[in-house]
Image: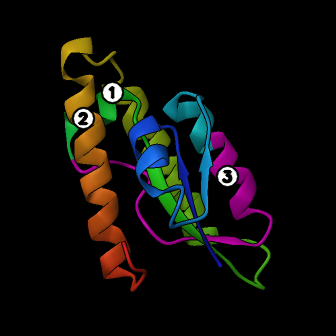
Amino acid sequence: MYRIFTNNSLVYERFRESHDVAFTDETADGLLHILEECLQSGWQLLTVALPPNVPLIRSGICTVVLRKTAQRFDVPGLKHIGRARERREMLARSGRPQVLDDLKMIDALFLEQSLREIGVPA
């Protein structure tokens, strides 16, 4: 079972019909906290929790894909979340509102690519 976790309303609207999407209006830091809890209760991180570019990191937009597993803890995933949190703290700054819609679209496109790479239809 796969689940998309996001704080990107565009991702939620675009994928909620075809995928299991958990939406939160939390900041990226709040979402990282939720992900840590999931990774300690039988979920495995399948995609990166840190966007590949600085504007997305600064925007606070975060979308990841998790998979339910029999394993209780995802230690590599928890380490990744810790590194993502450190990187966000180092680069944190509010995104400019005029580019936020563009950043949401970029996040959605990265999700589509990630789903294809892990073999889940986008």
Span colored in magenta = 33-52
Name the mark nearer the viewer: 3 or 2. 2
Label 3: how many Cα within 10 Å (few below 14, some 14–19, many 20+): many
The numbered disc on residue 93 is none
Q: Do residues under tags 2 and 1 come within 8 Å of each other at their CB atoms? A: yes
Task: Report if residue 8 is visible in the image.
Answer: no
Counting every numbered tag in the picture gives 3
Q: Is residue 97 above or below residue 12?
A: above
State how far apart marks 2 and 1 are (Cα): 7 Å
Q: Which residue is mark 3?
A: 36
What residue sits 65% from the left and 79% below the top?
Answer: 1
Q: Position of residue 12 (x, y in %)?
A: 49, 46
N-terminal label among 2 and 1: 1
Q: Position of residue 65 (x, y in %)?
A: 50, 64
Question: In this rendering, does residue 48 appear at all?
Answer: yes
**Residue named by callout 1:** 59
- The residue wearing badge 2 is 103
Q: Sequence order check: which comes first, mark 3 or mark 2?
A: 3
Whichever of labels 3 and 1 marks the residue nearer the N terminus, that label is 3
Measuring from the top left, give residue 25's x and y in whole percent: 58, 29
Q: Give the quadrant of residue 118.
A: bottom left
Instruction: Please name the amino acid that badge 2 sits on.
Output: Leu
Nearer-the-camera pick, 15 or 60: 15
Tell me the kind of residue under disc 1: Ser
